[in-house]
Image (cartoon, rainbow, N blue to C red):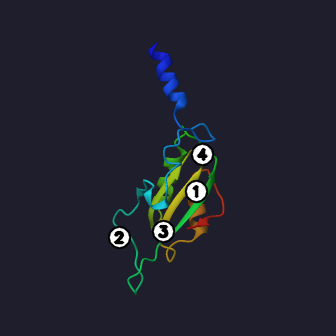
Amino acid sequence: MARSRSRAARESAPRSAFGCLSALEHSSGFSQLPFRDASAGRPRLFYDKEGSMSTARLTMAISGLSCGGGGALVVERALAKLPGVVRVYVNPATEMAYIEYDPSRLSWEQLAAAVESVGFRASEPMVR
């Protein structure tokens, strides 16, 4: 009896098209995603001379991630090591990376190279 109830609970949980649990897929905004803080020893946000925030946000599709493979953590760590990355979150269910970074210190090509250095493929970014 207990087996059938737990199986029913698992089957009724929301899932993505890839079959993974999708608790974060329905997040209502970029700023609400649980980013991994990549600001060790660096300011959390970067400001230009006028005092306005000069960070950029982009969303990048990453090919080859799977739900259980741990690839998302590997990609997050590779991106977090780059100087100029403020926050990064990789969702393995949607195969998307959400990155906040200082564009004066990093280019998209450098971000893509970091992803490719750990064995995954990055697509053209969607700037937010």
Q: Which residue is mark 4?
A: 65
Q: Which residue is mark 1?
A: 115
Q: Nearer the viewer, residue 15 or 87?
A: 15
**Is 70 displayed left or right of 123 in the figure?**
left
Q: Residues within 10 Å of mark 1 (few under 14, many from 20)?
A: many
The disc at residue 43 is 2
Residue drawn 59% across and 41% down?
16
Q: Position of residue 78 (x, y in %)?
A: 50, 56
Q: Quadrant of residue 60?
A: bottom right
**Is 109 displayed left or right of 13 in the figure?**
right
Mark 2 or mark 4: whose residue is earlier in sequence: 2
- Label 2: state its secondary structure: loop
Mark 3 or mark 4: whose residue is earlier in sequence: 4
Q: Are marks 2 and 4 in contact (CB under 8 Å)?
A: no
Question: How far, Cα to Cα, is label 2 from label 4?
Answer: 30 Å
Q: Position of residue 44 (x, y in %)?
A: 36, 67
Q: Position of residue 18 (x, y in %)?
A: 62, 40
Amino acid type of disc 3? Tyr
